[in-house]
Amino acid sequence: MNLGLKDLSVYHTQLSFIEATAKQVQKDFQLYGEEISFNGSHSTAYEELYSQIMPIMARLLNLDSSRFFALLYAIDVDEKKVKELIFGNEEIDTASELTHLILKRELMKVVSRQMFAQKSNI
Protein backbone atom coordinates (compact mmCIF):
# COMPACT_ATOMS: atom_id res chain seq x y z
CA MET A 1 0.00 0.00 0.00
CA ASN A 2 2.29 2.75 -1.22
CA LEU A 3 -0.23 5.44 -2.05
CA GLY A 4 2.09 8.23 -1.03
CA LEU A 5 1.07 11.48 0.56
CA LYS A 6 -1.19 12.83 -2.18
CA ASP A 7 -4.39 11.18 -0.97
CA LEU A 8 -4.39 11.09 2.81
CA SER A 9 -8.07 10.15 2.99
CA VAL A 10 -7.20 6.43 2.90
CA TYR A 11 -5.55 6.85 6.31
CA HIS A 12 -8.50 8.62 7.97
CA THR A 13 -10.13 5.33 8.93
CA GLN A 14 -7.06 3.33 9.92
CA LEU A 15 -6.89 2.94 13.67
CA SER A 16 -3.10 3.09 14.00
CA PHE A 17 -2.88 6.32 11.98
CA ILE A 18 -5.70 7.98 13.91
CA GLU A 19 -4.11 7.18 17.26
CA ALA A 20 -0.63 8.20 16.13
CA THR A 21 -1.95 11.48 14.72
CA ALA A 22 -3.75 12.27 17.97
CA LYS A 23 -0.54 11.59 19.92
CA GLN A 24 1.44 13.79 17.54
CA VAL A 25 -1.05 16.65 17.98
CA GLN A 26 -0.93 16.25 21.76
CA LYS A 27 2.88 16.26 21.76
CA ASP A 28 3.23 19.33 19.55
CA PHE A 29 0.66 21.40 21.41
CA GLN A 30 1.99 20.37 24.81
CA LEU A 31 5.36 21.89 23.87
CA TYR A 32 3.57 25.25 23.86
CA GLY A 33 1.60 24.70 27.04
CA GLU A 34 -1.63 23.75 25.29
CA GLU A 35 -3.42 20.63 26.47
CA ILE A 36 -5.20 18.51 23.87
CA SER A 37 -7.14 15.44 24.94
CA PHE A 38 -8.26 12.46 22.92
CA ASN A 39 -10.89 10.08 24.26
CA GLY A 40 -9.95 7.31 21.84
CA SER A 41 -13.12 7.40 19.76
CA HIS A 42 -11.89 6.80 16.25
CA SER A 43 -15.15 7.72 14.56
CA THR A 44 -15.08 11.25 15.99
CA ALA A 45 -11.31 11.78 16.26
CA TYR A 46 -11.07 14.52 13.66
CA GLU A 47 -13.98 16.49 15.10
CA GLU A 48 -12.69 16.04 18.64
CA LEU A 49 -9.20 17.29 17.79
CA TYR A 50 -10.54 20.06 15.56
CA SER A 51 -12.88 21.38 18.27
CA GLN A 52 -9.96 21.72 20.68
CA ILE A 53 -7.37 23.11 18.29
CA MET A 54 -9.52 25.73 16.56
CA PRO A 55 -10.14 27.94 19.63
CA ILE A 56 -6.45 27.71 20.55
CA MET A 57 -5.47 28.90 17.09
CA ALA A 58 -8.01 31.73 17.20
CA ARG A 59 -6.73 32.86 20.59
CA LEU A 60 -3.06 32.67 19.63
CA LEU A 61 -3.69 34.39 16.30
CA ASN A 62 -5.36 37.32 18.07
CA LEU A 63 -3.39 37.51 21.31
CA ASP A 64 0.02 35.87 21.04
CA SER A 65 1.43 35.98 17.54
CA SER A 66 4.91 34.85 18.59
CA ARG A 67 3.57 31.60 20.11
CA PHE A 68 1.18 31.27 17.17
CA PHE A 69 3.97 31.34 14.60
CA ALA A 70 6.32 29.25 16.77
CA LEU A 71 3.68 26.52 17.04
CA LEU A 72 3.01 26.53 13.30
CA TYR A 73 6.77 26.40 12.66
CA ALA A 74 7.19 23.47 15.06
CA ILE A 75 4.35 21.58 13.40
CA ASP A 76 5.88 22.51 10.03
CA VAL A 77 2.74 23.88 8.42
CA ASP A 78 3.41 25.21 4.91
CA GLU A 79 4.42 28.85 5.40
CA LYS A 80 3.04 29.92 2.03
CA LYS A 81 -0.40 28.49 2.86
CA VAL A 82 -0.35 30.16 6.27
CA LYS A 83 0.42 33.54 4.71
CA GLU A 84 -2.33 33.05 2.12
CA LEU A 85 -4.82 32.37 4.90
CA ILE A 86 -3.72 35.23 7.12
CA PHE A 87 -3.29 37.88 4.45
CA GLY A 88 -5.66 36.60 1.81
CA ASN A 89 -9.42 36.33 1.65
CA GLU A 90 -11.02 38.07 4.62
CA GLU A 91 -14.26 36.14 4.22
CA ILE A 92 -12.83 32.85 5.49
CA ASP A 93 -12.41 31.75 9.09
CA THR A 94 -8.62 31.82 9.33
CA ALA A 95 -8.40 29.84 12.58
CA SER A 96 -10.67 27.15 11.18
CA GLU A 97 -8.68 26.79 7.96
CA LEU A 98 -5.40 26.75 9.90
CA THR A 99 -6.77 23.98 12.08
CA HIS A 100 -7.51 21.90 8.99
CA LEU A 101 -3.94 22.52 7.76
CA ILE A 102 -2.52 21.50 11.13
CA LEU A 103 -4.46 18.25 11.25
CA LYS A 104 -3.50 17.43 7.67
CA ARG A 105 0.18 18.15 8.40
CA GLU A 106 0.15 16.05 11.57
CA LEU A 107 -1.33 13.12 9.63
CA MET A 108 1.27 13.61 6.90
CA LYS A 109 4.03 13.34 9.52
CA VAL A 110 2.61 10.06 10.81
CA VAL A 111 2.17 8.61 7.32
CA SER A 112 5.67 9.72 6.28
CA ARG A 113 7.24 8.07 9.32
CA GLN A 114 5.36 4.85 8.63
CA MET A 115 6.39 4.83 4.98
CA PHE A 116 10.01 5.52 5.92
CA ALA A 117 9.95 2.77 8.53
CA GLN A 118 8.59 0.30 5.97
CA LYS A 119 11.33 1.19 3.49
CA SER A 120 13.98 0.81 6.20
CA ASN A 121 12.75 -2.70 7.01
CA ILE A 122 13.13 -3.92 3.43
Image: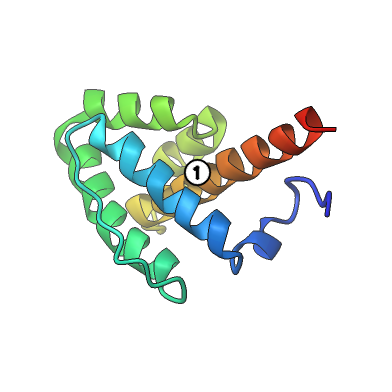
Q: Quadrant of the N terminus?
A: bottom right
Question: Which residue is nearer to you in this view: 66 or 15?
Answer: 15
Which residue is depicted at the point 19% across and 41% down? Answer: 34
Tag 1's secondary structure?
A: helix
Q: Which residue is mark 1?
A: 106
Residue extending furthest front?
121
**Rendering coords of residue 31 (x, y %):** 26, 29
The C terminus lies in quadrant: top right
Relative height, residue 80 to residue 53 (above, below):
above
Residues packed near mark 1 inside 10 Å, few (<14), some (14 to 19) or many (20 plus): many
Hey, which residue is sitting farthest bottom in the picture? 43
Give the image location of residue 53, x and y in percent. Answer: 30, 52
On screen, residue 22 above or below 75 = below
Q: Residue at x 67, y 56 (%)?
A: 8
Model colouring: rainbow
Q: Position of residue 16 (x, y in %)?
A: 55, 57
Residue at 27% in and 45% down: 57
Q: Hey, what amino acid is under mark 1?
A: Glu
The x, y position of residue 50, in whole percent, is 36, 60
Depth order, front residue of 52/69: 52
Q: Quadrant of residue 63?
A: top left
